[in-house]
Amino acid sequence: MDALGNDRTPTRSNLMRFCLLSTIFLLAVSLLGCGKKEPRADIVIINGAEPQSLDPAIITGQPDGRAAGALFEGLTRLNPKTATAEPAIAERWDVSTNGKLYTFHLRKNAKWSTGAPITSEDFIYSWRRVVDPLTASEYAGQLFFVQNAEAISMGKIKDLSQLGVRAIDTHTLRVELNAPCPFFLDLCAFRTLSIVPRAAIEKHGDRWLLTPPVPTSGPYALESWRIRDKIRIRKNPYYWDAANVQNEIIDLLPIDQQTTALSLYTTGQVDIIWDKGLVPNELLDVLRNRPDMHTFDYLGTEFIRYNVTKKPFDDPRVRKALALAIDKQRLVDKITKGGEKTASSYTPPGTAHYLPPAGLGHDPSLAKKLLAEAGFPNGKGFPNFIYLTSNTKTSVQLAVEIQEMWQRELGIHCEIAQKEWKVYLTDQSELNYDVSRSGWVGDYNDPNTFLDMFMSNNGNNRTGWKNPRYDQLMRDANQITDLNRRAELLRDAETLLVHDDLPIIPLFFRTGVNFFDPAKFEGIYFNLLDEHPLWPIRRKR
């Protein structure tokens, strides 16, 4: 066995790996001389696809969120080790005995990157902006626990000042909830609830993030954002915890091609790769023995969305038939190869205070029967349809495999539409698809982060599915404090989602994979939310 753990016998599998590694090396050499010469950042990170936006009220994807999270901060932030809420711009808070009233005390030394003080009014403006229907924030639902937030977002209340957030004074903020929310402090750490600069937004409109200097509230300031090149961020000297921000400059590269990502990493031009999808699956069994490959479990689910507003996907029998025809075990064994576990529920096992229900398994015979009952025996008369996917290699490989399963088992055919990240997200949001590859990573450790997104009025629903009983179960669950009874209601809701109505098909639970050399870097921790704040990461001296 060699250093990578491969037998030296030249089998076909090993020859394929050798060819792929050779290709990656040659690509790396060709890239060494590319790019404008400028000082190297302290840390260079491959962040995934080009962000759709860096505006906390607008972002929906992980690459967007990681970049925006370095620039903008909220009342709390996530602890890098535990991914639970800890004090941030709010240094402390008081909670009323009924759990519905929070009084946050802001730090006196909290400042924007311009040096201007951060005040209670900044939070009020930022949160009102999120729920304002004109903003069209798909994450506005994160604030629906606050009094009147949902009614404002739905246009039932026009006066933004009715949102349940009040400034007691310059550094004291009072928030009134509809009901006790056990994860509200975790929500306050989520990017959507970060504060943004009112003056810059009102002056520059949609171009506020492209008009320097951009006032930021987090540990870093935005030095430059060059589309399809990189985002360069620089330490914010006015950040309240600047003493613990370990790096002066960090570059975030928008790369979503696997061979490019791995070549840049293996030649030392990049220090960190965050995502498993940025490394060729064919090499995982070779790379897993290296000390710089790190695997961990986290709360992430890969799934398929249906557009239930389109025929024939408005028929639950059709949706179930397509789900039952998918051999999920084959997907993880043949394509992903990272130790992923197949999923019948949407909420991952290990989510706090919750045991998810079982959904549908693999049953081609039942799938054929249901499809025939829906009027398409052996697929006859079933229209060709579009499978929307992002253009990452793994996503496309999964789409091709599922396409073949549906053709073989059901006699139906779909065309695969590969879209660049921004277009893919837009098409999903606008229901411009038939079925779509999807993924979700928990924003906090509670089943609500997975289940509330499929409520009728949630911007992250993106299926057109509306079920009044589901909505009511979710509302009832989030009105009670008894964790056991709450879990029962959430299980009833999820049963509708993954077994009875099925607007989605859970495929598998994700496995986290990061690449970085632990001999060179510290401050990176593995947690259930796959959250890795940039401020504590540092190069060892």
Image (cartoon, rainbow, N blue to C red):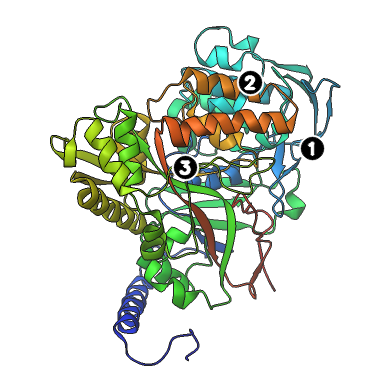
Q: Which residue is mark 3?
A: 61
For the residue labelled by badge 1, is the local secondary structure a helix, a strand or a loop?
loop
Q: Could you give the CA–CA distance between mark 3 and mark 1, rounded to whole angstroms?
A: 31 Å
The quarter of the picture where the C terminus appears is bottom right
Q: Nearer the viewer, residue 128 or 235?
A: 128
Q: Could you give the CA–CA distance between mark 2 and mark 3, rounded to whole angstroms?
A: 29 Å
Q: Nearer the viewer, residue 425 or 362?
A: 362
Q: Residue at x 69, y 61 (%)?
A: 523
Which callout, 2 or 3, points at the residue further toward the start of the chain? 3
**Residue 176 position within the rendered picture, expressed as x and y whole percent measured from the top left:** 73, 18
Q: Amino acid at mark 1?
A: Asn
Question: Are the two marked residues, 2 and 3, in contact with CB atoms closer than 8 angstroms?
Answer: no
Q: Amino acid at mark 3?
A: Gly
Q: Could you give the CA–CA distance between mark 2 and mark 1, rounded to whole angstroms?
A: 40 Å
Q: Is residue 48 visible?
A: yes
Q: Which residue is mark 2?
A: 476
For the residue labelled by badge 2, is the local secondary structure a helix, a strand or a loop?
helix
Q: Which residue is mark 1?
A: 109
**Residue 148 position within the rendered picture, expressed as x and y whole percent measured from the top left:** 62, 13
Q: Nearer the viewer, residue 294 or 45?
A: 294
**Residue 406 position within the rendered picture, expressed as x and y whole percent measured from the top left:** 25, 48
Which callout, 3 or 1, points at the residue further toward the start of the chain? 3
- Label 2 crowding class (10 Å Cα cut-off): few <14, some 14-19, many 20+? some
